[in-house]
């Protein structure tokens, strides 16, 4: 009608008509609501999680295109509803912009939050990372039953986890991937005491096995850990966790290469398994996963 692009218009108009529409539609989700936050990997992780749950045979509401502020989140639910205003969904997988968490959480309380990482991003709009951390902490404090699934290799994510009382699940990489990258870090000092971090190994940025030399704040014990990582094409690694009968390990691979994908696949795996997706089903979903929106897309231009 408006001859404009962008699904956020649906959300913007819907909120004008009915300010409680997100609360009402989210309440119609039959099982769990996942939200995925973080600077990098939100859309890929969220779409992989959605694909895995759908592969199990469930109906899922998801903002696939990455429209992740309040209007985009509302649009995902509105466009997923029928003309009756009813939603037919078992689960919801919703990517949310980090700064928008405190705008979205008043409308519904998610069952799980996946936190991928935090880096300096769009400083003109958001300011420093401290403000983003405060927004996420506030949102989680208002939803104390939300389980936080977070990248413990990132001290910025671990700092958030230490500030909230929510149930928590940690994941990380338990070995040095030996990445020959510029090790520019978005945090070198502990947020609790301003002591310097020391690393046993660093993957990229500030992600790795860290410890504050002053107060002892360190990477939390990993509930799920990746090892035997092969950064080829396809990417492959083993993921382990402590089960009822001892350590459980599964082998995973992804057609998309890159060290970032180790974290993305881990996060999606953990979240999907919390709702009963098995290893075989998850791997099938990853094998045919389309990142969408141009992410991880290969282009050939003038022979290169």
Image: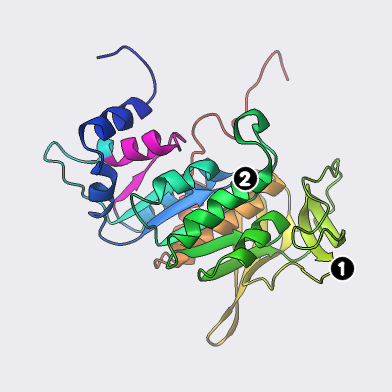
Q: Quadrant of the N terminus?
A: top left
Q: Is residue 283 visible?
A: no
Q: Looking at the image, is 209 positioned above or below residue 204?
A: below
Between marks 1 and 2, how big is the CA–CA gap? 24 Å
Residue at the image position 30 percent from the left and 62 percent from the top: 31
Q: Looking at the image, is 9 positioned above or below residue 54?
A: above
Give whichever of 280, 121 is nearer the camera. Answer: 121
Identify the secondary structure beneath mark 1: loop
Q: Looking at the image, is 281 positioned above or below residue 289?
A: below
Give whichever of 88, 101 is nearer the camera. Answer: 101
Q: Is residue 30 visible?
A: yes
Give whichever of 106, 231 is nearer the camera. Answer: 106
Give whichever of 202, 234 is nearer the camera. Answer: 202
Residue to which mark 2 is pinned:
131
- Asked whether, in this view, residue 84 is left or right of residue 180, the answer is left
- Asked whether, in this view, residue 34 is left or right of residue 268, the answer is left
Residue at the image position 82 percent from the left and 66 percent from the top: 211
- Asked whether, in this view, residue 298 is left or right of residue 204, the answer is left
Residue 135 shown in magenta: no
Identify the secondary structure beneath mark 2: helix
Q: Which mark is residue 49?
A: none
Residue 83: percent from the left, percent from the top? Answer: 13, 36
Residue 202: percent from the left, percent from the top? Answer: 82, 55
Residue to which mark 1 is pinned:
214
Q: Quadrant of residue 199?
A: bottom right
Residue extending furthest toward the left: 84
Q: Which residues are magenta?
A: 59-77
- Asked whether, in this view, residue 187 is left or right of residue 152, the answer is right
Numbered label tally: 2
Residue 49: percent from the left, percent from the top? Answer: 46, 52
Residue 77: percent from the left, percent from the top? Answer: 29, 42
Residue 75 shown in magenta: yes
């Amino acid at each position: 009608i408006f001859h404009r692009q962008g699904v956020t218009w649906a959300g913007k108009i819907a909120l004008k008509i009915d300010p409680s529409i997100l609360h009402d539609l989210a309440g119609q989700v039959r099982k769990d609501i996942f939200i995925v936050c973080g600077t990098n990997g939100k859309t890929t992780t969220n779409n992989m999680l959605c694909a895995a749950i759908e592969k199990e045979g469930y109906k899922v509401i998801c903002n696939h295109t990455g429209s992740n502020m309040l209007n985009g989140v509302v649009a995902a639910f509105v466009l997923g509803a029928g003309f009756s205003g009813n939603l037919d969904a078992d689960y919801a997988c919703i990517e949310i912009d980090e700064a928008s968490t405190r705008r979205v959480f008043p409308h519904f309380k998610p069952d799980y939050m996946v936190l991928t990482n935090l880096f300096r991003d769009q400083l003109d709009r958001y300011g420093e990372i401290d403000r983003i951390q405060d927004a996420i902490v506030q949102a989680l404090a208002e939803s104390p039953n939300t389980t936080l699934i977070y990248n413990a290799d990132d001290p910025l994510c671990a700092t958030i986890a230490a500030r909230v009382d929510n149930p928590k699940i940690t994941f990380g990489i338990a070995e040095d991937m030996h990445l020959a990258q510029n090790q520019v870090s978005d945090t070198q000092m502990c947020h609790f005491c301003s002591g310097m971090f020391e690393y046993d190994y660093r993957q990229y940025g500030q992600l790795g096995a860290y410890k504050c030399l002053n107060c002892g704040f360190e990477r939390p014990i990993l509930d799920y850990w990746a090892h035997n990582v092969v950064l080829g094409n396809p990417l492959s690694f083993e993921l382990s966790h402590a089960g009822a009968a001892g350590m459980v390990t599964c082998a995973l691979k992804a057609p998309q290469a890159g060290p970032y994908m180790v974290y993305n696949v881990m996060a999606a795996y953990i979240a999907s398994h919390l709702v009963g997706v098995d290893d075989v089903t998850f791997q099938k979903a990853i094998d045919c996963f389309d990142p969408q929106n141009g992410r991880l897309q290969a282009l050939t231009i003038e022979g290169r």
